[in-house]
Every structure is written in structure tokens, then in C-alpha cells.
Amino acid sequence: MDMKNVKNAMEKKMKEFEEANYVGYDFNEKQRAGSFFQKDNEILLSKSLYEGIEILAIEEAIKKYPEVKEKYYGKGFEKISIDFEKETEGGYFIRVKKGVKVIFPIQVCLYLKKNNFKQKIHNIVVVEEKAEVYIITGCTNAKETENAYHLGISEFFVHSGGFLNFTMIHSWKEDITVEPKGVTVVEKDGIFVSNYISLKPVKKITMYPCTILEGENSKARFSSIIISYPNSYHDVGSKCILANKNTSAEIISRSVNYGGTVIARGHIKAISPYVRGHLECKGLLLTEKGTIYAIPELETLYQDVDLTHEAAIGKIKKEEIEYLASRGIPEEEAQSLIIRGFINIEILGLPDIIEKEITKILNKI
Amino acid sequence: MLKIDNLSVKSGDSVILKNINIEIKESERVFIFGPNGSGKSTLIKTIIGISNYKILNGKIFFKNKDITELKISERAKLGIGIMFQNPPKIYGIKIYQLAKYLCKNENEIKELAEKLRVDELLRRDLNVDLSGGEIKRVELFQVLLQKPKLLLLDEPESGVDIENISVMGKTLNDYLERGNCSALIITHTGYILEYIKGNRGYVMIDGKITCESNPEKILEMIRKYGYEKCEKCYGKENEGI
């Protein structure tokens, strides 16, 4: 295919899956380490652009590598004694080989197209010893899709000294139900950073993944930004188990509610002494119709731990709007500036390239 | 420029300002003195339109236009700028972000930031983790970028060290001189008077103007006798003496 045809084919795809462009998926694949694209139950693309990174459909990976079943598939859920849906179709297997470090993110798009379709997938990410990777996953649907459902089962394994920065962007519509379920296991000196962003209306999202910091000195940071609308229901949070000494976790959540229901959870549990954890949960309720229910939980089995939390929910302070208005900024604009500031994505600590993507998305809402 | 006509204001259940009349002409600098809780800040916040303060009677005119019912942002756009005593912390909005909103000329922003020694603070969130003196300098920085024709300054020098009072005082005076700008300035310490020459001073006690004179003279009296004398003066006035 000559360059012109490649360009045309790409433009066609960008048009066909237009919504994918709004969840950080770049069809140009410039500045990407690899791509995975699944439409309903159909895997359209699984491609690595970087040596040392494998991206396969999960079924293919299970066939090709016996260790996937032996070491990874279902093993995360076993650790927390939770059952999971086995009847899945598709999903990705991403493995970053030992010592491989890549700055550009791997991009994933999980796309719903058919009406009333139930997309059920199983994903596995393996970050081997001292490897480093960024993954940006966009989950979305075609404009015309009705009453679809997405169930994403995810198991992430960060081996010794590994680093995984996983950003998930949800962009659904009013009649879509979503239930991601995930477990992450982090070994000695490993770091797991999880960012979750939901900016569009949705019928219902229930998501409460669990991370186990199993190895000494391992760390995790979870940040979430949720914008809720009338008739949207978000029950979203993170749970982190501090299972070895010198492990630490931080959970930060920001929700802006225009009239939906937001349940913002966070749970840090210490099952080892000498651990640290902090939970910060803030919510802005912009109408009288919505609900924000913040549930920060701290739990310890030991005395020698440092666990803290802060939570604050309420409306925008009038004093702040009036202060900006006194600088000549119209009151309505002042309010949206404050909301933008509140959901300041700098708290996510993303690499520039992903931050730019998300700023683009935020500017469109 | 500004005319306050028989203004009475309440906050909650208490009447704070009682029948205030003040007029400030173009390029005039007017100082207000008074003990804590006398209503000075309320006056300034009412002029800009802060909603905690309800006007019971009276009107506020700016450039001959009745602004009593105008929105805050509209008052600011007409040319009123305010420097708050205790501005709110606003997370996620950077000082430079607001500066760029207020002034399109990057060089001008840079120059003023250096002059007021806030250039190192521009990437901070608004009023977050700033010292008392830094907050004042950032307030002055913002309000001067607005290029107002009337400056309302609520204790601009409180909490500022001597060296920075000098920086602020000179910058302020320079702006007032060059821009033919009027100012209504609340001061406790009077340090700012060393840099800005006042046309008139008022003493406010218990929500009323009790004295009108040369600001240096008023300050001298307050330094000598405290507000006690002013209160007595007020008492006499009430008795019709």
C-alpha cells in the first residue's frame, strides 16, 4: 500500500471509530509503543511497535505461552479470594520484558458498537523485573450504540522493580452499563500508578479494583476524576492492601457532580507493620439533585502504621467565585475556571504526552 | 469618580454601615482609619459588590453610573479594582493563569512580576501556601494588571516586611500617578502614607464616619491618643456639639 492509501485507510478508521479519538487513541500511532483495538468481541488490532513489548489477544497468548495460564490467568483474583467471570471473549495480553523501559505509551481501545451487546473481556498485563511502561486505555462506544454492556476483567502483575502507569479513560453514554473488575499484584520495589477518568454521562459504572502491595518497598498511587450527570451512577474507588513492610499507597479522588449519583470509595488496609497510606477524597456537588457519598476507609492489623485520610464534599464556595469576578471574570466563567482547577489533572502526575491528551479531552467537555 | 450616597449596610442581623457619604474625585487618594470591626472592610467589599453585605439604603455611583445593583464582574470591568485583605485560596488555578487572563502582554506581566517580586510565585495556586506578605504582593500584582481607574485597597501593608512595603508603596504610587487613578485605602499602621500622598482621610467608628481631615494629621492624632479621641469626637458630634 502506498503512503496515500495508508493515509486514506487511516482517515477512514478515524472517522469510523470517531469516539476513540476522544479517549486518547491515536490512529497515527506516532508516539505510541503499541496498539490494541477491540470492537465488541472482535479484535481489530494487536500490535507492538517496540522491541521487548508483546501485545496479543488473550486467547492467543494462552495458546502460545503455557505460563500465562500457570502464572497469571485468574491468579490475581485467587490472591484476594474473589471469583470472576470466566465466560469472556477477547481482551489483551501485554507483556513488557525484563529491563525494557519505554516512554511512549501503549494504547488500548475497547469499543462498543452493536446494540444490546455484552462485551466481556479478560486483560492481563505483565511488567517483568525492572521494566517500565505506560498504558493508556480508552473505553467508549459508537454514537448510535444502544443499551450495551462492558465487563472488563483485568489482572496486572508488576514484578520486582517494575513500573506500571495505567491510565483508563471512560467515555460512555446514558444507556451503557460498565463493570470493570481488577486486581494488581506488585512485587518488591515495584510501582503501580493508576489513573481513572470518566467525563461523559453513563448509566452505571461499578468499579472497585484491588491492589496488593506484596513485596517490600512497593508503592501504589491511585487518582480518579469523575464527572457525573443526571441519571448517571458511579460507584467507583480503589482498594489497596499493604502486605509488606515499607509499602505505601495514596488514593486521590475528585468528583464533580452535575446531578448524578457518585459513590467515591477508598480503602487502605494494612496487614503488615511499617507501612504508610493516605486517602484524599474531594467532591463538588453543583446542583441540589445529585448525591455524593464519600466512603474513605482505613484498616490496620498493626500499631506501627501511618494511615491518614481527608474528605471534603460540598458546593463551590461563593467567596471563590466572587473573588475571581472582582478581577473582571464573568461569574459563570469564574465557576467553570474553579471546576477546571478542582479537577486539575496535574494531580495525576502523568507524563506530558498523556497529560496533553487528557487536557484535549477536558477542553471538549 | 466614586460617590457613596447615604449608604447603610447589614451583614446577617447586624447593621454594619450607617448612612455613609463619601465622594472621591478623579486622581484623589482617600484614606480610611478606624479600629478593628468598625466597618472599613465592609465598605470596600460593598463597593465591589460582595454578596454577604446587604444594602439597606443608599446608592453607589461610579463614573456617574449607579452601580448599586451591578454584578461584581461588571463593576470590575467598569474600572474598579480591589485588593483583598484575606483572599480565598483557590486550588488548581495558577497565579500566572489569572495574570494572562488580566493582561495579554507577556512582557508587562513579567516586568510587573519582577518589580513586585512575585516572579517566583507565578506557578503557585492562587493564595495557596503563600506567606502573608506574598499574598499582599500577589494581590497588588493582579489588581494592577487589571488597570483599574479606582483602587480599593484593604490594608495593603499589613503583614508585609519593611523592605517589601517600600517595593509595594513605590509601585502603587507610580501606578496612581501615571494612570490618574483614584484610590480608597484602608490602613492601620499608616506606613503606606510614606509612599502615597493622601488628599483626605476619614475615621470610621462603629459603622459611621466620625472625622474628616488631612490623613497625616489623623494618623498623628491616632498615634498619640489612639481612637479614644476619635470616639469622643464622635460622641460630641452625636450630642450635637
Image (spheres, coloured by chain):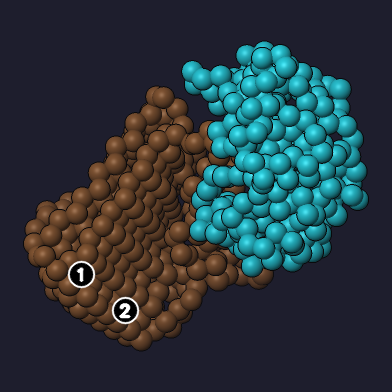
Proximity of marks 2 and 1: CB atoms separated by less than 8 Å: no
For the residue marked with disc 1, what is the amino acid?
A: Val
The residue to which callout 2 is attached is A162
Q: Colour of chain A?
A: brown
Left or right, B5 with reference to A247: right
Report crowding for label 1: few under 14, some 14 to 19, many 20 or more residues within 10 A (C-alpha).
many
Subunit ID for the residue under disc 1: A
Give me the residue at 69% from left, 66% from top.
B163
The residue to which callout 1 is attached is A275
Q: Position of residue B152 (x, y in %)?
A: 73, 39
Q: Nearer the viewer, residue B192 or B239?
A: B239
Give me the residue at 58% from left, 70% from top.
A30
Quadrant in the picture for the N terminus of chain A: bottom right
Label 2 vs label 1: CA separation?
20 Å
Left or right, A206 with reference to A344: left
Report crowding for label 2: few under 14, some 14 to 19, many 20 or more residues within 10 A (C-alpha).
many
Give me the residue at 30% from left, 67% from top.
A220
Subunit ID for the residue under disc 2: A
* Label 1: element kind: strand
Q: Is residue B231 above or below residue B181?
A: above
Inspect this view and state whether residue A131 appears: yes
Q: Is residue B39 above or below residue A82?
A: above
Letter of the chain shown cyan in the rendering = B
